[in-house]
Amino acid sequence: MDTSDCWLLNINKMEWKKLTNIPDSVTDRDGHSLSAWNETQTTHWIIEFGGVGSISDTRFIEMISSTGDLIVQSVLDINEYQKRRIQDAVGKWMEEGSVDLTVTRVNMLGAPGAGKTCSQLLLLNEDPPTNDTSTPIACPAVRATRVAVCDKTIWNRVTRDKLLDQLAADLESASQEKKPKEPPLPVVFTLLDNTQPATEIRPDPSPT
């Protein structure tokens, strides 16, 4: 057995398995730390960080359960892992994102110079017009309209960026509420280097 191999112990079957497709940035380390968690019943992650040698950066190892066995799917650095999380969130948002919109139609009627454009801007919590293509004043009647319609409710113009921000916020909130609570799988991970004992990862009994 090579001291730079990566082996996995299945404590249910009490069998060792050598993991393949592991780069040297994962195996050629000394004095490092490991942590593991289950994202789903079929997707598992190992995070490796630290070390006393020249390699000490953080690596994320993605493992997929296939027919009862674990296969290394990818090995990512911290920037690649963060990009992957963003892509996953956007993909989930594209599948499940939604927003409730209420359409309120307001008809502005009046003679030229009556303050129609000004009223519209004030209703949207925006400043009155300052150019000469519209009435550049906020007459008393318009100011009174703004006070009357406010009543602790601010109307805002809907823009594409604001709408996307709201969708993203709703998605993040919904994903936290709908996140499945799955019991962790009992697995032991170890990187053998003739000096470090096996690192055992036990299920966390506390609720998630």
Image (cartoon, rainbow, N blue to C red):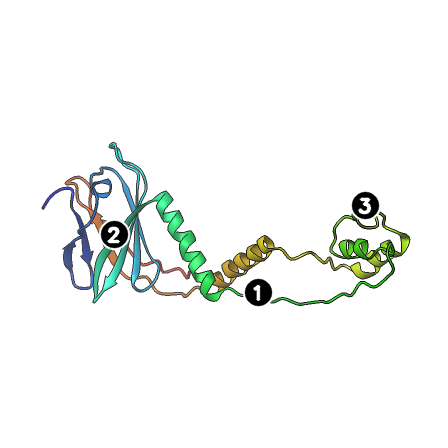
Image x and y of residue 3, in percent: 13, 42
* N-terminal label among 3 and 2: 3
Task: Kindly identify the amino acid type of the residue bearing the numbered disc 1.
Answer: Val
Query: Residues under labels 3 and 1: Cα distance?
Result: 38 Å
The residue depicted at 22 percent of the width and 37 percent of the height is 30
| Residue at far right of view | 140
For disc 1, the marked residue is: 99
Q: Nearer the viewer, residue 6 or 109?
A: 109
Task: Kindly identify the amino acid type of the residue bearing the numbered disc 3.
Answer: Asp
Taking 159 as reference, is 77 above or below it? above
> Alpha-carbon neighbours of circle 3 within 10 Å: few (<14), some, or many (≥20)?
few
The residue depicted at 84 percent of the width and 55 percent of the height is 115
Residue 55 occupies which quadrant of the picture? top left
Helix or strand or loop: what does disc 1 sit on? loop
* N-terminal label among 3 and 1: 1
Left or right, 141 with respect to 129, comes to right
Image x and y of residue 4, in percent: 16, 42
Which quarter of the rendered picture does the C terminus lie within? bottom left
Image x and y of residue 187, in percent: 25, 58
> Alpha-carbon neighbours of circle 1 within 10 Å: few (<14), some, or many (≥20)?
few
The residue depicted at 66 percent of the width and 67 percent of the height is 102
For disc 2, the marked residue is: 200
Query: Residues under labels 3 and 2: Cα distance?
Result: 75 Å
Mark 2 and 1 residues: CB-CB less than 8 Å, in contact? no
The residue depicted at 9 percent of the width and 46 percent of the height is 1
